[in-house]
Image (tube, grey):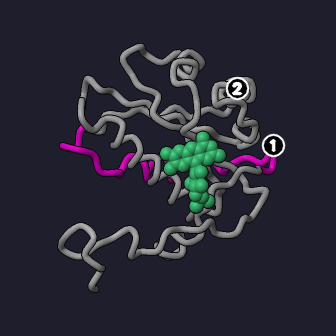
Amino acid sequence: MEFFDVVRARRSIRKYERGEPVRAEDLRLILEAMRLAPSAKNLQPWHVIVVRDQERKKALARAAHNQRFVADADVVLVCLSDPGVSPKWHDKDAMIALEHAALAATALGCGCCWIGAFDPEAVKRILKAPEELVAVAMMVIGVPGESPPPRPRKRLEELASSEEFGRPLDI
Ligand SMILES: Cc1cc2nc3c(=O)[nH]c(=O)nc-3n(C[C@H](O)[C@H](O)[C@H](O)COP(=O)(O)O)c2cc1C
Protein backbone atom coordinates (compact mmCIF):
# COMPACT_ATOMS: atom_id res chain seq x y z
CA MET A 1 0.00 0.00 0.00
CA GLU A 2 1.21 3.49 -0.78
CA PHE A 3 2.12 5.54 2.30
CA PHE A 4 -0.85 7.94 2.30
CA ASP A 5 -3.23 5.08 1.59
CA VAL A 6 -1.90 3.39 4.74
CA VAL A 7 -2.30 6.55 6.81
CA ARG A 8 -5.86 6.99 5.54
CA ALA A 9 -6.77 3.32 5.96
CA ARG A 10 -5.63 2.95 9.59
CA ARG A 11 -8.43 2.75 12.14
CA SER A 12 -8.67 1.64 15.72
CA ILE A 13 -10.04 -1.88 15.34
CA ARG A 14 -11.87 -3.17 18.42
CA LYS A 15 -13.33 -6.39 16.98
CA TYR A 16 -11.13 -9.26 15.83
CA GLU A 17 -11.58 -12.64 14.17
CA ARG A 18 -10.84 -14.84 17.17
CA GLY A 19 -8.37 -17.64 16.54
CA GLU A 20 -7.18 -16.08 13.25
CA PRO A 21 -3.40 -15.67 13.47
CA VAL A 22 -1.25 -12.86 12.14
CA ARG A 23 1.20 -14.47 9.73
CA ALA A 24 4.67 -14.94 11.20
CA GLU A 25 6.33 -13.01 8.36
CA ASP A 26 3.91 -10.11 8.88
CA LEU A 27 4.62 -10.03 12.61
CA ARG A 28 8.36 -9.97 11.84
CA LEU A 29 7.84 -7.01 9.47
CA ILE A 30 5.81 -5.17 12.10
CA LEU A 31 8.59 -5.64 14.64
CA GLU A 32 11.17 -4.61 12.03
CA ALA A 33 9.23 -1.39 11.47
CA MET A 34 9.50 -0.76 15.21
CA ARG A 35 13.22 -1.48 15.18
CA LEU A 36 13.76 1.10 12.42
CA ALA A 37 11.91 3.87 14.27
CA PRO A 38 13.87 6.99 15.20
CA SER A 39 14.70 7.77 18.83
CA ALA A 40 16.42 10.61 20.65
CA LYS A 41 20.21 10.18 20.31
CA ASN A 42 19.38 6.82 18.68
CA LEU A 43 19.25 5.32 22.18
CA GLN A 44 16.27 3.05 21.43
CA PRO A 45 15.33 2.99 25.12
CA TRP A 46 12.49 0.51 24.77
CA HIS A 47 11.71 -3.17 24.73
CA VAL A 48 8.63 -4.79 23.23
CA ILE A 49 7.04 -8.00 24.47
CA VAL A 50 4.98 -10.02 21.99
CA VAL A 51 2.11 -11.67 23.85
CA ARG A 52 0.07 -14.42 22.17
CA ASP A 53 -0.73 -16.77 25.03
CA GLN A 54 -4.50 -16.67 25.59
CA GLU A 55 -4.37 -16.62 29.39
CA ARG A 56 -1.76 -13.87 29.42
CA LYS A 57 -3.80 -11.82 26.93
CA LYS A 58 -6.84 -12.23 29.17
CA ALA A 59 -4.79 -10.98 32.11
CA LEU A 60 -3.69 -7.97 30.03
CA ALA A 61 -7.31 -7.29 29.07
CA ARG A 62 -8.24 -7.26 32.77
CA ALA A 63 -5.30 -4.92 33.51
CA ALA A 64 -6.62 -2.71 30.70
CA HIS A 65 -9.79 -1.99 32.67
CA ASN A 66 -11.53 -5.00 31.14
CA GLN A 67 -11.22 -3.94 27.52
CA ARG A 68 -12.13 -7.44 26.43
CA PHE A 69 -11.19 -7.12 22.78
CA VAL A 70 -7.57 -7.02 23.94
CA ALA A 71 -7.80 -10.80 24.47
CA ASP A 72 -9.53 -11.39 21.11
CA ALA A 73 -6.70 -10.05 18.96
CA ASP A 74 -4.00 -12.55 18.03
CA VAL A 75 -1.12 -10.40 19.28
CA VAL A 76 -0.66 -7.86 22.01
CA LEU A 77 2.54 -5.84 21.78
CA VAL A 78 3.50 -4.31 25.10
CA CYS A 79 6.13 -1.61 24.91
CA LEU A 80 8.27 -0.93 27.96
CA SER A 81 10.72 1.94 28.20
CA ASP A 82 13.82 2.53 30.27
CA PRO A 83 14.09 5.97 31.91
CA GLY A 84 17.61 5.04 33.02
CA VAL A 85 18.72 4.99 29.37
CA SER A 86 16.90 8.14 28.21
CA PRO A 87 15.37 10.11 31.08
CA LYS A 88 13.62 12.67 28.87
CA TRP A 89 12.53 10.68 25.82
CA HIS A 90 12.12 7.03 26.87
CA ASP A 91 8.33 6.95 26.72
CA LYS A 92 8.04 9.16 23.63
CA ASP A 93 10.51 6.95 21.77
CA ALA A 94 8.46 3.90 22.72
CA MET A 95 5.34 5.61 21.35
CA ILE A 96 7.07 6.44 18.08
CA ALA A 97 8.09 2.80 17.67
CA LEU A 98 4.54 1.65 18.41
CA GLU A 99 3.07 3.96 15.79
CA HIS A 100 5.50 2.46 13.29
CA ALA A 101 4.00 -0.89 14.30
CA ALA A 102 0.48 0.45 13.75
CA LEU A 103 1.25 1.71 10.26
CA ALA A 104 3.12 -1.46 9.31
CA ALA A 105 0.22 -3.59 10.57
CA THR A 106 -2.22 -1.51 8.51
CA ALA A 107 -0.05 -1.77 5.39
CA LEU A 108 -0.09 -5.55 5.81
CA GLY A 109 -3.89 -5.66 6.10
CA CYS A 110 -3.98 -6.30 9.85
CA GLY A 111 -6.20 -4.46 12.28
CA CYS A 112 -4.66 -2.76 15.28
CA CYS A 113 -5.54 -0.55 18.22
CA TRP A 114 -3.54 1.48 20.69
CA ILE A 115 -4.19 0.61 24.33
CA GLY A 116 -3.19 3.35 26.75
CA ALA A 117 -5.80 2.79 29.44
CA PHE A 118 -4.30 0.19 31.76
CA ASP A 119 -2.74 -0.31 35.16
CA PRO A 120 1.00 -0.18 34.35
CA GLU A 121 2.10 -2.01 37.49
CA ALA A 122 -0.35 -4.85 36.85
CA VAL A 123 0.93 -5.13 33.27
CA LYS A 124 4.53 -5.30 34.50
CA ARG A 125 3.60 -8.06 36.95
CA ILE A 126 1.89 -10.09 34.20
CA LEU A 127 5.00 -9.82 32.02
CA LYS A 128 7.57 -10.28 34.79
CA ALA A 129 9.13 -7.00 33.67
CA PRO A 130 12.08 -5.47 35.54
CA GLU A 131 11.08 -2.92 38.19
CA GLU A 132 13.00 -0.03 36.56
CA LEU A 133 11.09 -0.23 33.26
CA VAL A 134 7.91 1.70 32.50
CA ALA A 135 4.93 0.04 30.79
CA VAL A 136 4.20 2.77 28.23
CA ALA A 137 1.50 1.47 25.91
CA MET A 138 0.15 -1.62 24.22
CA MET A 139 -0.86 -2.30 20.62
CA VAL A 140 -3.27 -5.09 19.79
CA ILE A 141 -2.93 -6.58 16.32
CA GLY A 142 -5.07 -9.16 14.59
CA VAL A 143 -7.28 -10.07 11.69
CA PRO A 144 -9.94 -7.33 11.63
CA GLY A 145 -13.51 -8.31 12.39
CA GLU A 146 -14.93 -4.87 11.60
CA SER A 147 -14.38 -2.10 9.12
CA PRO A 148 -15.35 1.15 10.82
CA PRO A 149 -15.63 4.44 8.96
CA PRO A 150 -12.99 7.13 9.55
CA ARG A 151 -13.32 8.95 12.87
CA PRO A 152 -13.63 12.72 12.71
CA ARG A 153 -10.58 14.94 12.94
CA LYS A 154 -10.15 18.65 13.63
CA ARG A 155 -9.67 20.81 10.59
CA LEU A 156 -6.04 21.47 9.67
CA GLU A 157 -6.55 25.20 10.36
CA GLU A 158 -7.28 24.35 14.02
CA LEU A 159 -4.13 22.29 14.31
CA ALA A 160 -1.58 24.34 12.42
CA SER A 161 -0.45 27.97 12.11
CA SER A 162 2.01 29.74 9.87
CA GLU A 163 5.04 31.43 11.47
CA GLU A 164 3.40 32.30 14.83
CA PHE A 165 0.85 30.66 17.07
CA GLY A 166 -2.64 31.44 15.84
CA ARG A 167 -1.59 33.07 12.57
CA PRO A 168 -3.74 31.52 9.85
CA LEU A 169 -2.13 28.76 7.89
CA ASP A 170 -0.78 30.23 4.70
CA ILE A 171 0.40 27.41 2.48
C1 LIG B 1 -1.96 6.95 23.21
C2 LIG B 1 -3.27 6.32 22.82
C3 LIG B 1 -3.96 5.55 23.74
C4 LIG B 1 -5.15 4.93 23.36
N1 LIG B 1 -5.76 4.08 24.26
C5 LIG B 1 -6.86 3.41 23.86
C6 LIG B 1 -7.45 2.44 24.72
O1 LIG B 1 -7.01 2.18 25.84
N2 LIG B 1 -8.55 1.77 24.27
C7 LIG B 1 -9.09 2.00 23.03
O2 LIG B 1 -10.08 1.35 22.68
N3 LIG B 1 -8.54 2.92 22.20
C8 LIG B 1 -7.44 3.61 22.57
N4 LIG B 1 -6.86 4.50 21.71
C9 LIG B 1 -7.43 4.71 20.36
C10 LIG B 1 -8.09 6.09 20.20
O3 LIG B 1 -9.30 6.10 20.92
C11 LIG B 1 -8.31 6.34 18.70
O4 LIG B 1 -7.06 6.42 18.06
C12 LIG B 1 -9.10 7.62 18.41
O5 LIG B 1 -10.40 7.54 18.94
C13 LIG B 1 -9.22 7.89 16.91
O6 LIG B 1 -9.77 6.79 16.22
P1 LIG B 1 -8.98 6.08 15.04
O7 LIG B 1 -7.72 5.47 15.65
O8 LIG B 1 -9.88 5.00 14.52
O9 LIG B 1 -8.63 7.09 14.02
C14 LIG B 1 -5.68 5.14 22.06
C15 LIG B 1 -4.97 5.92 21.15
C16 LIG B 1 -3.77 6.48 21.52
C17 LIG B 1 -3.00 7.26 20.47
User: What's the magenta region?
Assistant: 16-43
Residue assigned mark 1: 19
Where is mark 2, residue-wise?
Answer: 62
Label 2 to label 1: alpha-carbon separation: 19 Å
Q: Is residue 90 above or below residue 140?
A: above
Residue at 40% from the left image edge and 70% from the top image edge: 158
Q: Which type of secondary structure does the marked residue at label 1 adopt? A: loop
Mark 2: amino acid: Arg
**Residue drawn at (67%, 34%) of the image:** 52
For residue 162, say whether it is visible: yes
Picture coordinates of residue 147, whole percent (x, y):
74, 65
Please tell me which residue lies in front, 159 or 8: 159
In which quadrant will I find the N terminus? bottom right
Toward the viewer: 148 or 104?
Answer: 148
Q: Quadrant of residue 42?
A: top left
Considering only order in the chain, which callout, 1 or 2, is on the residue closer to the N terminus? 1
